Amino acid sequence: QVQLVESGGGVVQPGGSLRLSCAASGFTFSSYGMHWVRQAPGKGLEWVAFIRYDGSNKYYADSVKGRFTISRDNSKNTLYLQMNSLRAEDTAVYYCAKDHDDYGDYDAPLDYWGQGTLVTVSS
Amino acid sequence: DIQMTQSPSTLSASVGDRVTITCRASQSISSWLAWYQQKPGKAPKLLIYKASSLESGVPSRFSGSGSGTEFTLTISSLQPDDFATYYCQQYNSYSSAFGQGTKVEIK
């Protein structure tokens, strides 16, 4: 069965950095695009970033462009999110999620999600 | 960027009611729209994709319709397990976006 397990969350000071990981299993990771989606406490879902199955295309929300970097290691079945210059408004649960369709670009819904990892940006 | 607007923000209904949630896109997204259900403390669950296709394993009381800029999610007969928050998502452009959510509460 498909499993996505996020890790790396925690408390960080404003201006600091954090790297999130998402370990994938139960499917051919190298065939699927992957996303990061976040949810601030008590708020709605916000799409953060997408990476194509082969890593050739990456897209970001305007709110994180230039500060966050999405990457993947298909040999380790792992997705990453490097977060720099963190702000209070980046405080959220961060979910990784898998594309519904294989070999796509951005044009697919998200069919499996991890349980999320909490990032708190506070002094 | 494409903005997604859901209505209503909150909906009070009873078990057995027919429920409809609307999602509007700021520009045409063809049929590249999905609906998700989220319960407190849990990850979202995909219900509908491509505006009207039912995800495998999702009960048939859920249905979706629409194209272009206006879409609806309908629950034909609300069940106790359906009280949750529902989100629409457009995946027409490389900058995806979710609606703000509709919370379905017990009346």
Image: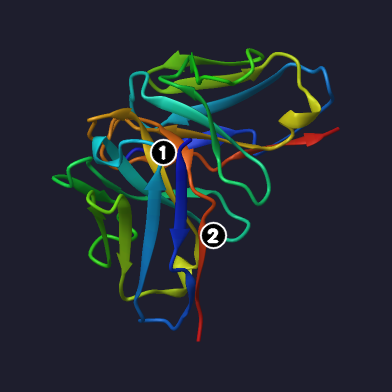
Q: Which residue is mark 2?
A: A40
Image height check: is B67 above or below A119? above
Q: Position of residue B61 (x, y in %)?
A: 67, 14
Residue on which the image places disc 1: A26
> If you read the primary sequence from the N terminus, does the residue marked by circle 1 or circle 2 appear first?
1
> What residue is rendered at 17% in x and 42% in y?
A54
The quarter of the picture where residue B77 lies is top right
Q: Position of residue B6 (x, y in %)?
A: 55, 34
Position in image of residue B67 (x %, y %): 41, 16
Q: Position of residue A26 (x, y in %)?
A: 41, 38
Identify the residue at image location x=32%, y=44%.
Answer: A34
Question: Dot 2: what SS?
Answer: loop
Q: Does residue B26 appear to the left or right of A70 in the view shown?
A: right
Same chain? Circles 1 and 2: yes
Q: SS class of the residue under badge 1?
A: loop
Q: CA distance from mark 1 to mark 2?
A: 29 Å
Query: Which of the pair A85/A19 is nearer the observer?
Result: A19
Looking at numbered disc 2 in the image, what kind of residue is underneath it? Ala
Residue in the foreground of this view, choosing between B69 and B93: B93
Whether residue B32 is visible: yes
A73 relative position to B99: left or right: left
Circle 1 packing at 10 Å, graded few (<14), some (14-19), many (20+), is few
Give the residue type at disc 1: Gly
> Does the image show residue A61?
no
